[in-house]
Image: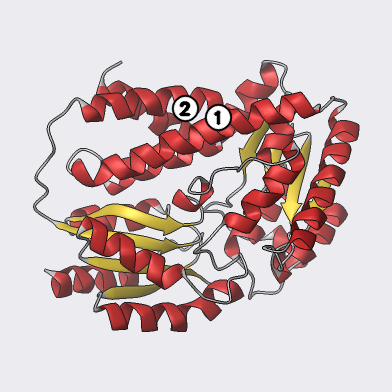
């Protein structure tokens, strides 16, 4: 395939998750929805199931208001709204990690209002000690058993080890892609970059790996591009709003790298070696750095972002704070201090899915683009 053909295929998948869901179900496969973040997709994949990420979307929150107050993360509210309205009909089960107050309450809201079976589990905060690893391995064992019961499948040790290999290969291919992007910012615009990464949420990872591998090879065969605009790095939970990405492009800003939950954080940490598949998955959680949802007393996120900014010659950072997200709000003051100390310009913006008016966002991004020019 040509470069445009590969990009068009990935963009189609990113823009049509509902069609992908229906196609998988029609083919006889069972689909498992995965709430953010760090849901152990490998366990579902090992049972012959199709894990599909659930990152909310731009929808009017109506029925979900019966279950949540107004001040709630719009990603989770949108997921429950879709569930209540039947948008996820055909999904065999959903996995919900209980890593924040909103997700913890969502397990019961989902159980009360949505017919799709729910599998809940909790990540330990003390994640770097052996007790934390052992605890999470036991949680993952309960996830495995629940999925086997709900989906009437068998999840063996060998199958999980194979799935870990498939996912690790995907992570390596995606890591290569994001490292290639800074050299091809005229071709890989913010919208296209987002589509390449986002499409992986709605495809079997082995299929997505093949497409991105092909894309990487095409990019490596091209001469490096001279981008005349300014390069930014993004950070936050999710920044895939079409309007936001288009505003970046209109202001000649390119996303050269990111520390975003829905993007690079998904594949930046490989599953390490260990004594069993479940222990290996638990060890991965202990190795994650630079994320507000993974307990980090040293608060390394700002330093990690600063290192990437200096390494890639990035001009500024955009911090997209998901509205009403406590972990992200607590992170920001320390992050700001790190950016100020490193002399890195940054823009703080509140993000909320379903917001149709982007004029304030447009003005702030345009001003930021002028400042770093």
Q: Which mark is residue 205?
A: 1
Q: Is residue 210 above or below residue 14?
A: above
Q: Is residue 109 above or below residue 220?
A: below
Residue pictured at 54% horizontal, 51% vertical: 57
Residue pictured at 87% horizontal, 45% vertical: 142
**Taking 238 as reference, is 79 left or right?**
right
- Image quadrant for the C terminus? bottom left
Q: CA separation, marks 1 and 2?
A: 6 Å
Q: Name the foreground residue: 17 vs 70.
A: 17
- Image quadrant for the N terminus? top left
Residue under label 2 = 209
Q: Is residue 43 above or below residue 133?
A: above
Residue pictured at 16% horizontal, 71% vertical: 372
The percent coordinates of residue 67 (x first, y second) are 77, 65
Q: Quadrant of residue 87?
A: top right
**Taking 191 as reference, is 323 left or right?**
right
**Taking 343 as reference, is 76 left or right?**
right
Q: Which mark is residue 168?
A: none
């Amino acid at each position: 395939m040509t470069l445009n053909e590969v990009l068009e295929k990935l963009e189609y998948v990113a823009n049509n998750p509902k069609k992908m869901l229906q196609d998988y179900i029609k083919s006889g496969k069972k689909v498992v929805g995965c709430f953010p973040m760090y849901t152990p997709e490998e366990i579902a994949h090992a049972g012959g199931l199709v894990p599909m990420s659930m990152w909310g979307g731009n929808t009017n929150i109506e029925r979900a208001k019966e279950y949540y107050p107004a001040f709630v993360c719009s990603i989770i509210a949108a997921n429950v709204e879709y569930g209540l309205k039947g948008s996820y009909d055909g999904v065999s089960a959903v996995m919900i990690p209980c890593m924040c107050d909103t997700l913890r309450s969502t397990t019961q809201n989902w159980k009360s209002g949505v017919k799709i079976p729910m599998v809940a589990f909790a990540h330990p905060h003390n994640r770097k000690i052996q007790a934390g690893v052992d605890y999470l391995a036991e949680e993952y064992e309960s996830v495995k058993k629940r999925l086997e019961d709900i989906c009437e499948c068998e999840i063996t040790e060998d199958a999980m080890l194979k799935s870990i290999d498939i996912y690790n290969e995907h992570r390596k291919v995606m890591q290569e892609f994001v490292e290639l992007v800074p050299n091809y910012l005229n071709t890989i615009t913010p919208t296209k970059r987002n589509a390449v990464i986002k499409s992986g949420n709605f495809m079997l990872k082995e299929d997505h790996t093949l497409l991105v591998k092909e894309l990487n090879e095409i990019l490596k065969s091209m001469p490096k591009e001279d981008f005349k605009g300014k390069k930014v790095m993004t950070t936050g939970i999710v920044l895939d709003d079409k309007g936001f990405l288009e505003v970046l492009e209109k202001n000649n800003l390119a996303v050269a790298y990111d520390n975003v939950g829905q993007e690079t954080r998904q594949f930046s940490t490989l599953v390490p070696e260990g004594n069993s598949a479940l222990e290996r998955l638990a060890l991965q959680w202990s190795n994650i750095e630079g994320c507000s949802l993974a307990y980090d007393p040293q608060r390394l996120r700002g330093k990690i972002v600063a290192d990437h900014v200096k390494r890639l010659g990035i001009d500024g950072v955009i911090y997209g704070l998901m509205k009403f997200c406590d972990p992200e709000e607590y992170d920001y003051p320390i992050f700001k201090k790190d950016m100020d100390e490193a002399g890195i310009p940054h823009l703080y913006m509140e993000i909320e899915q379903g917001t149709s008016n982007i004029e304030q966002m447009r003005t702030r991004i345009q001003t930021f683009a002028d400042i770093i020019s």
